[in-house]
Image (cartoon, rainbow, N blue to C red):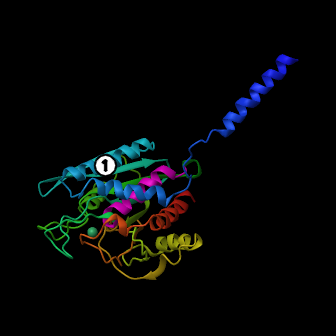
Amino acid sequence: MKHRRCCMMLLLALMLTACGTPTPSLPETFSGDLAYPWVTRQCDLGYRITGTDAHRQAGDMILKELRAQGWAVREQPFTYKGVAARNILAWKGDGDAVLIGAHYDTRRAADQEDPAKPVMGANDGASGVAVLLELARTLQWDTTQRRIYLAFFDAEDNGRLDGWEWIVGSTYMAAHWGENGESPLQAMVLVDMIGDADQQVYYERNSDPTLSKTLWDIAAQLGYGDRIIPEYRYAMLDDHIPFMRMGVPAVDMIDFDYSYWHTTQDTPDKVSAASLEAVGRTLEVWLEK
Ligand SMILES: [Zn+2]
């Protein structure tokens, strides 16, 4: 009797210990507060200009995180005007495939201000990557019937500098899609410059209107109607275009009302966690439907 009570007390003590131990747990849904540090981590590496060490390190950091989150990954190296570049493609799941993309290079000249200086690209580059990496952590695969691709495009942002074109990496990826067994795409969404603390993401004129409405409707249901605004504004030459040309319904989520675009002022203080979260949650809900 005495012995049994002793055991019960020991058991109770163990249970109390277990209950009292704080278990560190991360939020299950997309968190702007967890996405934002990916902006600073990229910027801490320096200017991620195609062909530089900082850019290579950014690519390696992206690969490391994708692998840590259990994604299959493939590097897609290519050379453009004698400069080594690489796209990064990650995927999970099976079924109809959709692709979410962002460019991870930054522009080598801040030609809206001083072309002798480079662009840090906290919003123009790093914000889209941050959204993709937080999605890589949070997407719930048991509720999806899809293959999701995450694409990190290189060489998007040196257009008109030394004869470079825009959207070089995404053009290369689209041209070679399927050669390594990639699934046919049902849809593609690009996120570019979506981190501005003063956020206004309008319908983009070269995007698929039906898919745009689907995404913007989800944003409205989530309470982001004042940030992700169902009105047309700009027509963009961006990384969604090569996929549109393949016949894939594609959408560019972009906030082009950004005064620091292609200036030296495109720095992490201009980006907010709340803005990353609005776009990230919208995509998360769409992908998990
Ligand atoms: Zn740019």
Q: Residue 203: give x, y in percent of width and height.
A: 43, 77
Ligand 1 rendered quadrant: bottom left
Residue at 68%, 34% (x, y): give it. 17
In the image, residue 17 above or below residue 184: above
The residue most toward the right is 1
Secondary structure at numbered mark 1? loop
Residue 130: quadrant of the picture:
bottom left
Along the viewing direction, whichever of 242 and 163 lies nearer the viewer: 163
Residue at 48%, 70% (x, y): give it. 211
Q: Amino acid at mark 1?
A: Glu
Looking at the rendered structure, the number of numbered marks drawn on it comes to: 1
Residue 189: quadrant of the picture:
bottom left
Residue at 39%, 49% (x, y): give it. 90
Q: Residue 40: give x, y in percent of width and height.
A: 35, 57
Along the viewing direction, whichever of 9 and 83 lies nearer the viewer: 9
Q: Which residue is mark 1?
A: 179
- Residue 124 located within the stretch drawn in magenta: yes
Magenta stretch in the rendered image? 123-140
Residue at 18%, 68% (x, y): give it. 109
Q: Is residue 242 visible?
A: no
Residue 71: quadrant of the picture:
top left
Please identify the dominant SS of the magenta region: helix
Q: Quarter of the image containing the N terminus?
A: top right
In the image, residue 130 above or below residue 112: above
